[in-house]
Structure formats: C-alpha cells, structure tokens
Amino acid sequence: MSAIALAGWETVIGLEVHCELRTRTKLFCGCPNVFGEEPNTRVCPVCLGLPGSLPVLNRQAVDYAIRIGTALHCRVQPSIFHRKNYFYPDMPKDFQISQYDIPINAEGWLVLPSGKRIGIVRAHIEEDTGKTTHIGGGGRIHQAGYSLVDYNRAGVPLVEIVSAPDLRGAEEAREYVEELRAILVATGASDGKMEEGSLRVDCNVSVRVAGSAEFGTRCEIKNMNSLRSLGRAIAYEAARQVELVEAGEAVVQETRHWDEADGRTHSMRSKEEAFDYRYFPEPDLVTLAPDEAWVTGAREHLPVLPAERRARVAEAACVPVSTEAVATVVRLDLDGLVAAAVAAKADPGLALRRLANEVAGELDGRSGGDIEASAFVRLVHMEQGGELTPAQARTVLKTLVAQGGDPAVIAAGLGFEALATGALAAVVDQVIAANPREWERYTGGDDKLAGFFIGKVKAATGGNADLRAANDLLRQRRSG
Amino acid sequence: MSQSFVPDFASAPTAAAVASGVRRGELSARDVLDQYLDRIRMREGQVHAFNLVMEEAARARAAEVDQAVAAGGDPGPLAGVPVALKDLLCTHGVPTTCSSRILEGWAPPYDATVVTRLRAAGAVVVGKTNMDEFAMGSSTEHSAFGPTRNPHDVTRVPGGSSGGSAAAVAAGFATVSLGTDTGGSIRQPASLCGVVGAKPTYGMVSRYGLVAFASSLDQIGPFARNVADAALVLDVIGGHDEHDSTSLPGDGPQAASNLGRGVEGIRVGVISELEGALGIAPDVASRVREAAEALAAAGAKVEHVSVPSVRYGLSAYYMIAPAEASSNLARYDGVRYGLRVRGDDITDMYIATRSAGFGPEVKRRIMLGTYALSAGYYDAYYGKAQKVRTLIIRDFEAAYRSFDVLLSPTAPTTAFALGAKMSDPLTMYLNDVCTIPSNLAGHPAMSVPFGCGDDGLPVGAQVLAPALGEPVMFQVAEVLEASAPARGGES
C-alpha cells in the first residue's frame, strides 16, 4: 500500500500518550518507583491491592501533573478520581484508579515546530498496571500455557495526555510526540524514554476525503513502542481504511493491535466487545483541589519550553520560527550556543547554520549540551573574520564536537594558517601587480575576471584564504 | 425459650475495671484471659462466635502485658482487656477470612490500624469473629463457616453482619470487640444481642486494614457491655491515620468527654418516620417511646421530628453499597491469593474461582452492583441513589438545627429465628431500615440496650448524632443505659 493510494484522502489522528512520572515513590504508596528491578520486589499491600489496603495520593505526582498541565496551557482544576473496572491479571485490584469526567488538566494546546497548534483535550493522573508475560500460545493471554506477572510497575504514576483529533498524517503525529516528549522532559516530570516504556502512545486513526468536514469512523491502535512504529502503524492503518472505503465497505470502530513483525494492525476487539468500565467515583480518595499558590508556583517555576526557545533562536538569527534549522537546534539542546554567539556579538545566523548542519550531523541525534560555548563562539568569530575559510571552519568544528578544545589550536594543528586580513591584502596586491593586463580589463568592467583573480589568490595561499574576503578586497581595489 | 449463654453482666468486670486493675498490678492479664478462655471452651460450641480463637497468641500477649506492668511500665488504657476482632480486620500473619471461602489460606502481611492501636493500648486479642460473608447480611447466617447463634437464645440469630463480635461480648468471650458497620452491621447485632454498639462518624476511625465492603459507608466501631467501655475503646481506635485518605483530621472522637454530664437541656428528636411504620414491631416501638420518656424525665427536651427522606434510605443503600462492593470484590480473582480454581484459560479461572469462592448473597450483591454501574444505567441507579444520599444529609442537617441528638429504634424487631429470613432477601434487608440513614449521611449512631420485647429478648434504642457528635451521643446513651428497665428473660 503506497502513499499514492492515499491521494485525495486525509488521515485524521488523535493521540493518547501515557507518561510515567519520575517520582521517587509510587502514586499511592511508599514503594520506590524504579525500572528494571527483580520482579515483585518493589511491592507492598497497597500496590498489590491486598484486601484492606487503601491509596494515599503522592504529592510529588500531583506536582508533576500540574507542571505538565501548565506547560500544555491547560486549565488546572479541582478534580476527582474514578475507578475504571475490568478484569486483567496485571491489575492487582481489577480496577484502575484514574480520572474520568473531571481531570486535573483540561483544554490546553501545544505548538508544533511547524507553527501548527494542536489541541490537548485533557492530561489526567492515573496508576500504571503491572506487566504480564504470556508463556506459550504466541504471547496472547487466552492461548498461553501460563503467564507471569510482575507488579513492580503496578501503581507507578502516569499522566495520560489526550490530544484533539488535530493531527494530519504520520509525520505530523511523530512531530507531535517529539514535541510533547521535549515538553515533558523540560518540566522534569518524565525521562522521556520510549524504549523503557516511560512514554507510551496509543493512537486513534480515521480517514476522510480531503477537504471534508466530517470525521470518518476511527480505530484505536495500540502497541507501538517507538516513533518509527507509530509512523508505520498510522501509514498502514490509513491505507487499510482508504482501501476499505474505496471498495465501498465501512470501517468498523474497534481497537487494533500493531504487529511490529508483520507491519500490520490486527483487530483486538470491536465496539460491541469493548469493556464497559463501569466508572464511578473512587470512594477511597477525596477531591484533589490544589490551591491557587500551588498552581501559580508551578507556572512560575516552569523552565523555558521548546516553543519559546525556538522563538528566541528565530528572533536572534532573524529567520522564521518554522525554519527547520531552528527546530533542529532546539531539539538537540544547541540553542544555548546561539544565545552565546549573540552575547559575544558573533553572527547568530552563521552560528545557527553551523549548529543545524555540521554540529547536528556530527552529533547524529545525540544531545549537544557539552560543547563549550566559548570555543564555539570563537570559531564563529574566526570564520566571520576570515581567519578560517568555511571549509576549514567545518573541519575544525567536527573536531571541536568530537574532542573539544580551542579552535585556534585545532586549526593550527590541521595546518590551517591563520590568514589575517592584512596578509590577505598583501597577496591580493601581489596578484594584481603580476597581472596588469587582466586588472585593466577588470577595472574596465569585465566582471568575469573576478574569478581569475580569486583563483590566483587561492593558488598563492594554498587554499588557506577566505575567498569571500579576497573578493571584497578586489572590489575595494577596483573602486579605490 | 432455649438456654441462654449470657453471663451475669452486673458481676463481670468492665474493660475499664480490667485495665485499671491490670495497670495497678492488682489483676493479672493472664488470669483475666483464662476466665474468658474458659467460657469460650464451655460455650463456643453452641454459640460459634469465632472463626478463630487465638488462644496461644492471646496467652503470650497477656504474659507480655503482665511483664510490662511488673517492669514498672504502663501497657495502656486497655491493659489486659480481652478483645475480639471481626474477621475482616487484617491481622499480621493470622488468617483473615471475611467468612468467605475465597480468602482460603490467606493471612495478611500487615495489621489494620485499629489492631495496631488496640495492641499499643495493651489489649489482648482473643480471636477473629464470625460474620456474614464480606459483611453482607443481617443475621450472620451468610457465613461460609456456618451461622453464629444469639447467646440469649441459640435458636435465634445474633443479627449481622458483625454477629460474631456482638455474640462474643454478650456471651462473655471477650470484654469488648470490634465490628464494622456499613448499613447497621454493628448497631443491629448490638440490639439483638443486648450489648452496646457504636458506629462513629465516617472518617473517625481509620479503615486501613478493614477489608472493604462499601468504602464510602464502612466504619469500624466497638461493641461493649456498657456505654463507658464503648467510649473507651472508640477513643483508643479513633483519630487521624495517614494511611486512610478519608480519615478526618483533628483530635479523634473524644467519646468519653461528656460522660457523667446528664442530659439536662439536651434536645432530643424522636424520628417520626421510624416510630411505627416500616415493619417496626409494636413492642420495639413501645421501648423506644419509654426511652424517650426516660430522657425527658432526666431533663432532656424531647420532641418529635420529621426526617422525610429516611424512607428512601434503604433503596439508595441497595444501589450504592452493592455498586462499591462489585468493584471492591473484583480483586478476588484467583490470581494472587486465596482460592484458585483452575480453568482452561484466564476467563475460565476467574469464573470457576468466583463461582466456588463466593456465597449466594455476595454473588447477588455483586450482580446488583455491576448492573447499577453499567453504561446506560448509571444515572438511573447509582447516580439517583447518590442524589437521595444528598437529600438524607440535607434532612438530617435540618433536624440537627433544632436537636442535639435523634432517637429511633435500632432494629425493627428482636432477634428472629435462624433461617426465618434466609429465603427472602428483601425481608432480610428491611432489618437495616433504621440504621442505614446514618451510614448514608456519614453520621455517628449507636445502639443501647433498652429493655426487652414481648419475647423477653433484648431491644436496642438508637441514638443518632450529627457528624463529630460522638461526645453528645455517648452522653445521651449513658443516661439511657442508666434508666433502662431491668433485664428480663435472662437466666
């Protein structure tokens, strides 16, 4: 199923992102909130749901939830907890304590690097379940020979962030998750590790004729454990739905399971088979009503969020905020270096280009927090001042990213003679003197000869000259 | 009338007397315990108050108490007092069954807060008492381990669901005991067994370690032979607990704070709706009338008051309590603890385990509650019931603007015969018509023995108070106790 099959169709996506909070202890008990311990060693009567045990809400979890809500421009409101009832062995109580009609955070938004605003319906608090491993029967519970359950994760605090169906296409969905992840990490609430399951994404996908105002019937897709599989799952599911509709069949509202191995989604349960969760207010907890000071405090202590950081970079570099380089620099935490360039009166545009291209390429997706600002700024100055050619600057920058150090020393070590403007002027004058006939034609208006002189300068300096500076000098001599 | 197993209350020491004797070294906790264990040995076979008698542990504990006193220490306000615990209060390492097969083989790895507090006060736990399975019932007949019998007449029920705890105190198997009250499960058996039983304000006593039936209604409270002992125990177990989010802040019940003050000037409202209607027997109604007169004679201002919505309490209760129960009891699924009946797959295992592990009344309520919460029915059932609850609270608030306490019967009749109501759940449910409104409102209420019915069996008068009204409630109860007619029909 190719993208061509989707011509004339629009994919509508809403995402539900579960974010594990980085609290010291679990949501309703004092057990440590840690990943990767021996199974069933981080449990107590409360998170095991033993008879007689009662939940007591973790204040730090609420604080993180408020930070998230604030960062997503949500209304932070007094809220209550509900029980979501269904039987599954990874749930110690056979119900999950969650929030239902009155979540702590409602009606917010975030802005993608493209500038598009995506609505946030809610961001509510709930507890995580344990983990089941089904042995035999292809890993499905009903066919398994037996199942193992680890309750270490049971009761770990989650915030579930539900987007409006504002996303269009797999790429935008991925962008949204990346942006949301950056926000969650910035608030300190999450470590953002998708591979450890601290960020998990379910998605609702429907298709409609491009330009239509009606939504199509949606399917919920579960079990994507990376951004890549999210993109693949959406692409597959959208194509599947388009094929159905084009064949005159109806899309059935259902939950579907993404199979990473065969690259398809498979029906899990239809709307009719969907659980009736029998939500009702959790009688063991009281209304959660954070006072004004708490919410205000959280808002005031929020770090600068990615959207604001992009705005600052764009403004400094005088480029539109939707420029890809801007998003790249912020995503890789390199925007501090742009700011450093601005502070040192180095060319922020040049700094941005070098960061978004060479540095980003060199980092290969890693975050670049440990590049020394003063060294980077010095390099920008050297390139700007003609001490290094752009090609030389790129080479020095690669070494700088890989090993650190002083760019002047790196340049010297690479044999890049620092060619000061004075020395360059002398070379230019020599070249002019050696070629009087060509100089006469050039001053007479034959601009093509500029290339001739630049070539001579390049040859005379062994390639170590800033050719733009040489060109400037030529023009000065002609007009002078 | 068949043989009574009720010892002579007047000569047996109270909890206060036992504790003060033990603390002063005049009584030995071991000697006190022995008397109780002797009575258990002689009569438990007929009464069946206990699921488990903890003879060895109790002796060890009594010895500890005696040693503490001998070493110059003070074991606390319940020093050496033998206490029985309803078998849904978690006891570390000791089976806690809720009188259900489904918890077969399970022993909690922790103590309920009330158990910790009793022990810290020097109490000696003698055993875990029988109950209606998961506290669902009014006769203690819905127990997987067979019924408890009323010590006043073993052909009769002790009431329920805390029938074992009521019977244990009435039979002299323990000086005091703890029960739980979700819709009357302390007060009704107290009434039927002729002992004092108190349900405190919701949130006054921690529910941590109380195996939940209906979380928004459950409260733990004491049974005792007199009002002062009940107050003493309540003051020990009550007060804020950080393990229970619904636990009230503040200084605890202070149940004993107004004892001895009399009722001069206290305004008592007799609830008109609960005077004679709703199946309340004429002899019971007469005793309550006499109780009102006794209070008036002691200086209280007694009038009638209407609390119209109490009529709907029973219906609202039978939506809310089963709804919460259906969720609370979901965890008994055979996966982690208790009974597991194997099945072909997980669904089969769930069904087989729960079919075998729960008795018929529990199943009935799980189904009722599941239905009440189902999509499309929630608003009509659970939602509506919550509105009735609000109405009841409002009606009570109105009444308490003019009255300090309210008065009504506790149970509509005296103890009924075993088996009499087992075939008709609705008739059984009507037992709680007078007690349920206090649970729905979250208010305290207690039952005090006040004479006997035409059959010579005990009748209880119920004193109701507003939230946090324990001091005035016990104050009035104490006067009722003092003015109660001499017990008839006892051997």
Image (cartoon, helix red, strand yellow):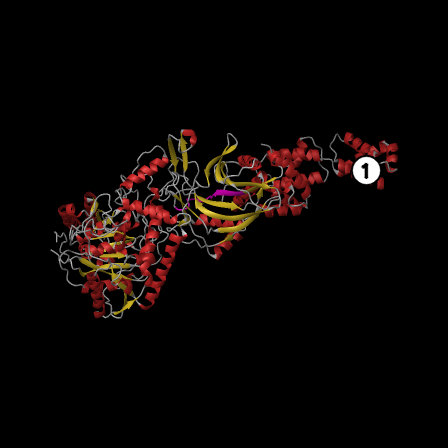
Nearer-the-camera pick, B86 or B356: B356
Left or right: B248, with A399 as reference point: left
Left or right: A99, with B34 as reference point: right
Nearer-the-camera pick, B11 or A453: B11
* Residue located beneath label 1 in the image: A474
Q: Residue furthest front?
A: A248
Query: What residue span does the magenta drawing correspond to?
Result: A14-28
Q: Residues within 10 Å of mark 1 (few under 14, many from 20)?
A: many
Position above or below: A309 against B441: above
Q: Where residue B169 sits: x, y (%)? A: 19, 53
Q: Residue at x 44, y 55 (%)?
A: A289
Nearer-the-camera pick, B191 or A219: A219
Q: Where residue B384 sits: x, y (%)? A: 38, 55
The reply to whether residue A453 is visible in this rendering is: yes
Q: Where residue A153 sits: x, y (%)? A: 42, 40
**Circle 1: element type:** helix
The reply to whether residue B91 is visible in this rendering is: no
Report the quarter where the N terminus of chain B lies.
bottom left
Q: Residue at x 37, y 59 (%)?
A: B390
Position above or below: B80 against B354: below
